[in-house]
Image (tube, helix red, strand yellow):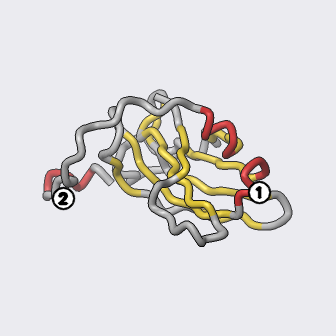
Amino acid sequence: MQSFAIVSEMQDEEDTLRLYELFIPVKSGDMFFSGAEIQLESSFKMSLDFHKSFEYEGDYYIAYLAINPIHENNVNVQIGYNSPDKARTAIAFCGNYQTYNLTELLKVRPPKKLPQVPAPPPSYSDKDDV
């Protein structure tokens, strides 16, 4: 599985910012996702909020970001895979990061979409599926 991004359909036409959806695989190799941030050189660097995605085949998290589209080519996304477990109860300080340009992620072909059904409600057994 590979990270990818799409331009979101959930935005107002009059909005000057473009909304992007970033899909991040839950696991890379033997490590689990630990966090993601975006950066526009010399302008900003910020962590992204993420949650479980049920939109595409595969095990993904989703994060949203809205930026002026003129900066699309200059925004980098850094994804960390530094946890030996899915619940992120431990962190390995091994610097296992993957850095992508937003434009690169928009070129990645998304996997097949899942049938649209409401996301299942969390249950106690889902405590490790953050």
Q: Earlier in the sequence, mark 1 or mark 2?
A: 1
Q: Amino acid at mark 1?
A: His
Q: Identify the element where label 1 is drawn.
A: helix
The quadrant in which residue 43 appears is bottom right
Q: Nearer the viewer, mark 1 or mark 2?
A: 1
Where is 2 relative to 120, above or below? above
Which image quarter holds the C terminus? bottom left
> Percent x, y for residue 35?
53, 53
The residue beneath circle 2 is 122
Pick whichever, 43 or 110, lies toward us.
110
Q: Residues within 10 Å of mark 1 (few under 14, many from 20)?
A: few
> At x 52% / y 68%, what residue is drawn?
12
> At x 62% / y 34%, what residue is drawn?
107
Q: Residues at badges 1 and 2 in contact (C-beta under 8 Å)?
A: no
Q: CA distance from mark 1 to mark 2?
A: 36 Å
Tell me the number on the disc at residue 71: 1
Q: Identify the element where label 2 is drawn.
A: loop
> At x 65% / y 65%, what residue is drawn?
46
Q: Amino acid at mark 2?
A: Pro
